[in-house]
Amino acid sequence: MSTKISFMKETLEQMERDYLIWEEFVLEGPSETWTIVNGKRVLVMCSNNYLGLANHPRLKKAAIEAIEKYGAGSGSVRPIAGTMKIHLELEQEMAKYKRKEASITFQSGFAANMGSIPQLVDQGDLIISDELNHGSIIDGIRLSRAEKRIYGHRDVSSLEKILATEAKKFRRILVVTDGVFSMDGDIAPLPEIVKLCDEYNALLYVDDAHGDGVLGENGRGIANHFHLEDKVDIEMGTFSKAFGCVGGYIVGSKLLCDYLRNKVRPYLLTGSQPPPVAAACLEAIKIVQEDSSLFTKLWDNTRYFKKSLQQMGFDIGQSQTPITPIIIGENKTTKEFSKMLFKEGVFGVPIYYPMVPKGKARIRTIVTAVHTKEDLDFALNTFEKVGKALKVI
């Protein structure tokens, strides 16, 4: 082994000692409630497939038809020769769904955040970010030349203190928050944040990746949930969770989207979504607008599952959404918990630093609209059995 890369071996060995190595799980079939993972049939309790659309027949049909019409790939970046009619149809439908003037789509939510945030601020500006914001937001902030401040998680008084102290020192202020926080399942106090942004003339950027398809009317997200759609300047989301596909988007004014089309590097310099992907995303948006029963079932399942876990004595934090963490604390115990679950037929992966703070390792569970009560009872019985065996409860 070359001495040039020996640091990699040393780092991985230390991570192994700290129980921080990620094990790779391989699905051998579609993303469904029950599927084959690493050769074993298991109940999936950790997917972001909130509405069960990832293997929906209408999405598959739309993707196949798009391949026949447009081919497998776009062949270029969006501004050169990579914009196909299906991309424009997707953006028009997303803007309609979100009740905004316009939208712009990206290859992933990560690309949307990492590419857009640096273009909204520059030297002489300030970004204020919730301390538990997603890593893609953090990387976007790092790529900007603006100064940054971090406010306490969902702590409006902390945000207000920063604004009161710093606002007059900077040309432009951008406040950034997740809508639904991906590891804890809690919701940003959007009405209070909007009020402060109005008071201090700050731009508001909301990453609603986990609010899409979950909160609001037919899953229109956190801004719709709080009736604040006209108060969020930049709303970002993904197609990789409730919509069952992959990709990212931003919705807002036509001016905003025109600006981003001409400034954001992942849009300008990366190949556009393959047409079957764009077509599947488009079909997913149509489905969620047609069928409200998916949301009813999602929330019925969520309430039942949370209540049962709490009655067993598990620590589920302050979750307000289908994301329900079972907080264990130690990495070693959490990894053992996951292994025992898998042996019993439940797929729930361990989550630890840097995805969550040190000492807050957990099994992050997510129920979906397509879990049956029998599925949930099987999972709950298994969690209880393992929890008692490891003295977690």
Image: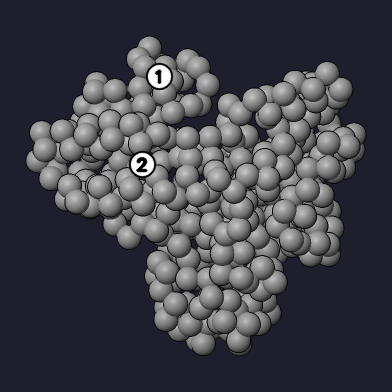
Q: Secondary structure at mark 2?
A: strand
Marks 1 and 2: in contact by CB < 8 Å?
A: no
Q: Which residue corresponds to the image point at 40% horizontal and 19% vertical from the top-left?
A: 37
- Residue found farthest to the top: 39
Residue 67 drawn at (x, y percent)? 79, 21
- Asked if 148 appears above or below 351 in the picture, the reply is below
- Kindly identify which residue carries mark 1: 37
**Could you tell me which secondary element the residue under label 1 belongs to?**
strand
Which image quarter holds the N terminus?
Answer: top left
Q: Amino acid at mark 2?
A: Thr
Distance between mark 2 and mark 1 Cα atoms: 16 Å
Q: Nearer the viewer, residue 157 or 101?
A: 101
The tag on residue 365 is 2
Horizontal arrangement in the rendering, residue 106 relative to residue 13 (left or right)? right
At 61% across and 64% down in the image, what residue appears?
224
In this view, 160 is above or below 228: below
Q: In which quadrant is the C terminus drawn?
A: top left
Name which residue lies at 29% across and 23% down.
345
Residue 193 percent across, percent down from the top left = 53, 75
Residue at image position (39%, 58%) is: 320
Examine the rendered structure and indicate whether residue 51 appears above or below residue 275: below
- Residue 168 appears in the figure: yes
User: What amino acid is at disc 1?
Assistant: Val
Report the coloring of the rendering.
one colour
| 107 vs 213, nearest the viewer | 213
Of mark 2 and mark 1, the one earlier in the sequence is: 1
Left or right, residue 225 beside residue 130: right
Rendered image quadrant of residue 76:
top right
Place of residue 213 in the rendered image (x, y in percent of width and height, measured from the top left): 57, 49
Question: Residue 2 vs residue 375: left or right?
Answer: right
- Give neighbour class at mark 2: few <14, some 14-19, many 20+ (Cα, 10 Å): many
Camera-nearest residue between 234 and 383? 383
